Amino acid sequence: MTTTQRTEGLLPVDEAGQRWVDTTLGALDVDQKIGQLMVFPHYGTFITPDVVEMIRRYHAGGLRIAQKFAPGAADGRANGGSGDPFKRPDADIFDRPEQMERISCTAEEFARTLNELRDMALDRPGGVPLHTAFDQEGEGADFLFEQRLYPFPMGQVASGDPDLAYRVALALGRQTRALGANMIHSPVLDVNTEPGNPEIGPRAYGDDPDTVTRYALESLRGFNESGIAATGKHFPGRGHSNADAHFGLPEIDLDRETMLRVHLAPYKALIEAGLPCVMAAFTSYPALGADGVPAATCRAIVTDLLRGELGFKGVVTTDNVQMGGLLAKCGMGEAVVRCLIAGCDLVLCRAYNRQKIEVLQAVKQAVIEKRYTEAALDASVARILALRWKTGLVENGGKVDPSKAGAAFHKAAHKDLALEAAAKSTVLLRDRAGLLPLPADKKILLVEQIHHFHRFINNTYVHPGMLWQEMRAHSPNVGVVAVNEKMTEADAAAVRRRLDDADIIVSTSYYNYRNHAIMLPFLEELRATGKPLVILANTPYRQFGVPDWVDTAVVSFCPSGRENLRVAAEILFGKRHSTASLSVSQL
C-alpha cells in the first residue's frame, strides 16, 4: 500500500502533501480537529472580536468571506429550530448584522485583512492555515471587492459557446485568488427541470443534463487552472424543487432512476474530471433514502451514494446550517452532528450569532459519546488538510501580495471578457409588439429597481440608476423612477405620478430569490395603463420575471454588471443585435 492510499477516501495528493497531512493531523487534539471542520463568517475589513475568537480559541478551519455583513438566511425567523431566539430584544449589533452598513474598502485593504487573519491562524497551536470560501455563480451571491461581474450560468449557455464558461471561470478565479480567496461555492450542477423552482432558475446552466454537464465541465476547467477549489452544488440536485430550502424542507419526489439519469449525471461527470468539493443539499429525497430529512444528514446519500456509488474522494461541505431546510427538524447543534455522522466534512455557518458555540459544543459531545467517532473526525480533517495542500495554503498560509489584489479587475482581458459575455448572453426574449428599437424622440419612463448589488457595491462600476445612465446615452428623453427591489407602496405612488407624461414604459423585472422580491404584481398595474410596455428581466421564467402576456422582453443574466446593462440598453435602442438564445425547454 502506498503512502497516498493510507487515508481512505482522500483526494490524492503527492507524497510531500501526504506527509504534511499526516504530521499535521497527528499534532491536533480533539478540539483543534473539530475547529477544522468549521467555516465561520468574515465580512469586509472589520475584524470583529467574534472572528478573532473563532480563529484563536475555537480553531476555525475556514472563513466564508464577502463584501458586506449578512445575517444568513434563517436568522430573520423567530427561532432556529431549537426554541432559542436568533434575535433577542437585547441582542447586540453582531446578533443583528443587517444593521451594519457595508464598509467601503479597496481590494488591497481587503487582502491585507485576510493576510492578518491568516497570520493569526498560523500563530495558533498547530499552525494550520485558514481556507477562505465565497459564493459566486456568475452574477449571483457574494460580491468580492473590485471584481468584474459575469452572467449567471444560464446566460453563459445562451451564448452557445462552452469556451465562454471556461474563460469566465478562469477570470473569476484569477480575480478572487488575487484577493485571497481559494474555495468557491460553484459551479451549480442542479438541472432546473422545474420551471417554478423559486431558488435555482438561471443559477443553473439549464434543464438538460447534457448541457449542464458540458458547460459545468468547462467551468471546472477554468476554476482548476486559476488555482481555486470548485464546489459542485447542491447534491444530489435541487433543480426539480418547487420550494426554497432557505425557508423550509423541500421534498423532491422523483424516482431513483430519474435522479440518477438526470440530476446526478453532472456530478458523475465532474467527479470523474477531478471535482474537489461537493455541497450537500438541505432537501428531502425519499427515493434516495432521505425521506423527510435533509440529504446532508442522510448517510445513504452522502456516504453510500456520493462516496460509494459515485466514488467521490474530495471534501463534502454543508450548505449554510442556518437555513430552514436543515433546521426544520431539530436545533442547529444536533443538525450539524447529523450532517457529520452522514459523512459531511465541512460545516458552513454564514452568520454572526452565538449558536456557533452551540454547534462546537454539540460536536464535541457527540465525539465524547462516540455518536460521531474520532476515526470519522480524523478522516474528515485529513480530507480538509489535503484540500489545503492542493490549493497551496501550506506554503505561506495562503497570503497574497495586497498591492496586486485589485489589478485583475482592471486587466484589459477581463474587461473585454465581461463585455463579450454580456453581448453573448443578453437575450431578446420576444418583441411581439414591435416596440424595439425604442424611438429616441418619444418620452420613455424607466421604472428601475435598485438591484441589491447596485445598492451595496455602489461605486462607479455598479450603482443605482445604472440602467437609466446607459439608456440616456441613446436618448435624452428617458426619465426614471428608482424603486426598491421589493417595491413599497411609496414606490408605486411615485411611479403613478409620472405615468401620464410617458409615451412608452420600460420596467425592470428583477427577481431576488433570497428575499423573494418580485415585480410581477406591479407589472400588471403598468399593463393596465394601456401604454406600450417593455420589460428588462434577470430571469426568463414566467412565474418570476417575464409573464406570458408581456409582448416585449429582454433578459439580462447579470443586471448587476455595468457591461450587461450597457448591452441591454444597446439592444433596446437597436444599436446592437442580440445573438443569444435560450436552451431551456420550459419557461
Image (cartoon, grey):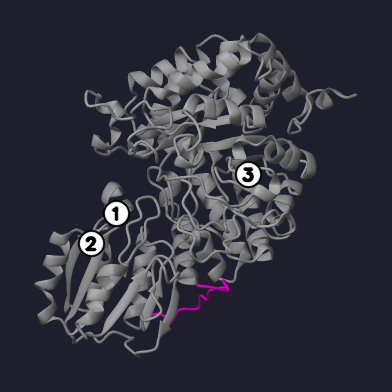
Q: Name the residue under label 2.
A: 465
Q: Position of residue 503 (x, y in %)?
A: 17, 85
**On the image, which quarter does residue 466 sit in?**
bottom left
Q: Which amino acid does label 2 sit on?
A: Gly
Q: Which of marks 1 and 2 is nearer the N terminus?
A: 1
Q: Name the residue under label 3.
A: 291
Q: What segment carries the magenta color? A: 576-587
Of residues 51 and 16, the one drawn nearer to the viewer in this rendering: 51
**On the image, which quarter does residue 231 sit in?**
top right
Q: What residue type is labelled 3?
A: Asp
Helix, strand or loop at label 1? It is: helix
On screen, 473 above or below 549?
Answer: above
Q: Earlier in the sequence, mark 3 or mark 2?
A: 3
Mark 2 surroundings within 10 Å by alpha-carbon count, few (fewer than 14), some (14 through 19), many (20 or more): many
On screen, 500 above or below 358?
Answer: below
Assess whether residue 586 is covered by the magenta stretch. yes
CB contact under 8 Å: marks 1 and 2: yes
Q: Where is residue 350 in the image (x, y as percent from the top left)?
A: 43, 34
Of residues 132 and 406, the one drawn nearer to the viewer in this rendering: 132
Drawn side of residue 440 relative to residue 183, left or right:
left
CB contact under 8 Å: marks 3 and 1: no
Q: Position of residue 484 (x, y in %)?
A: 23, 57
**Quadrant position of the N terminus in the picture:** top right
Q: Residue at x 61, y 41 (%)?
A: 295
- Direction right: furthest residue: 1
Q: Name the residue under label 1.
A: 454
CB contact under 8 Å: marks 3 and 2: no
Q: Which residue is drawn at 30% across and 79% down?
A: 534
Majority secondary structure in the magenta region: loop
Q: Position of residue 270 (x, y in %)?
A: 70, 50
Q: Residue at x 26, y 51 (%)?
A: 455
